[in-house]
Image: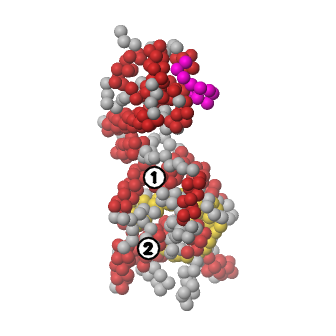
Amino acid sequence: MSSPFSEQLDAASGSTLYNVEAELSLLGDLLADNRLIDHVADRLRGADFSVPLYGRIFSRILEQAPVGAVDAITLAPFFREEDDWSRTFAVLSAAALNAGPRARTKAHFNQITMLSSRRRLIAGLHDVIASAANLEVTKEELVSNADEAVAEIAEQIETRQASVGTYAQVVIDSFGRPIVGVRSGLIGSLDDALGVLRPSDLIVVGGRPGMGKTSLVTSYAIGAAGQGSGVLIFSLEMSADQLTRRMLSDLCFSVRGGVLYERVRDGTVRGAEIDAVRAAKTRFDAMPLEINDTPGLTYLSLIRQARSHKRKLAAAGQTLDLVIVDYLQMMAHSRRGMSPYEHASEVSRALKEFAKAENLVVMAVAQLSRDVEKRPDKRPIPADLRDSGQIEQDADAILFVYREEEYLRRTEPEDQFGGKYEAWRKDMDAVRNKVEFLVPKRRHGPSGKAMGWFFGANAAVRSADFYRNSEEPPRG
């Protein structure tokens, strides 16, 4: 009659996705030279071993190493009750005596982790197949489950580590070179407030409805792409058609006028306006700017599609520098039962890790809670980010969009011939088309604020100096 341990061993040996000898050899090497334990402690788990007993032994090695030397003898008290411990003890003792060079240890370690990830992938795909047979599981859930199943093996990256001196030399070598990063160019006052957006930055853009968040990020995208930065916009709220109509009106706009968004939206463009729209289309053709409006994206799907686009650009000799997500809370939940706080936290953390891993900037639009409306001063603060806890922590910079005009418009007096109306009209004239850029958090520089212009009729946001070269005063 076979023992449970023998059954484990036979099960592990009966597949090409297991290498029991490599697992034993690695354990022996760790026991022979405890200095190797630190090299594998953060990259290997007990669950990565095909034989559960070997996994428990590895976990115990990690627990005992900080206390003192670990070998087969010091492990014995923890495993005497295990079936076939005497056999395992003999094998481990022999393996320790026959410990090989570090190159062999590394090879065995790499194979163990690779085989483990393959086994988890297969298990995950089996779960996906089982879900596919369940008609109550939606298509969106199936895609999310499939993404999660392949995520671990797809996202594996090499550990990036070097001495501070090595990194310091990279910094010194960069002196005198152009600053690498993203600027809008189109909204200079905002560029001054935010600074150059550096690769790995997560920028959160917040504001209440009607403040012009989408117009801000699309104007920023147009300016950045016009300077050669590769930009990908994930439009989770609007269709690509809707967003493109707004952007065409934006690109047509200048101090001399433009094509009203409502005309582009409704297809009522006439005469010279058609030429302006066609010219804008030609300019867009030359920009590395794309829109992705795939519905029901989870953060895993979004990241996968962004990476695919990055590879496509790289094949053409271009780079993906900026990914815009409009907006964060619209992203599909990765699993059922998540609270809004858990969902927003998961997405913001994933976007930050994505920005860092891919060395690019992520700009994510976020809705604010209604608490803003309860205060006399409606200017947002970081706590107003809806379900904000993790978002506020993950963000390298927070940018709030605020327009006094929008709130003042709601207080228009009914009597248009009284003194109150005249005072209200003067107040409106003072804030018409003006937008405030509030930057309460900026990890790489001081916080602050700046002013700009918001032209809702043209779906455009411009810099504070937009009228500097124009003889015409700003008009509503």
Residue type for callout 2: Gly
Instruction: Identify the residue shown where x is 52% and y is 14%.
Output: 80
Viewport quadrant of the C terminus = bottom right
Helix, strand or loop at label 2? It is helix
User: Which residue bears the numbered disc 1?
Assistant: 331
The question of residue 144 being in magenta is answered with: no
Label whose residue precedes the other's in the sequence (1 or 2): 2
Q: Residue at x 45, y 73 (%)?
A: 227
Q: Is residue 206 left or right of residue 249?
A: right
Percent x, y of residue 187: 53, 74
Q: Amino acid at mark 1?
A: Met
Residue 468 % position (x, y): 57, 85
- What residue is disc 2 on? 226
- Residue farthest to the top? 1
User: Residue 74 at what x, y percent from top left?
Assistant: 57, 20
Query: Dot 1 lies on which element?
Result: loop
Q: Is residue 128 visible to us here?
A: yes
What segment carries the magenta color? 62-73
**Would residue 68 be counted in the magenta stretch?**
yes
Q: Residue at x 53, y 30 (%)?
A: 33
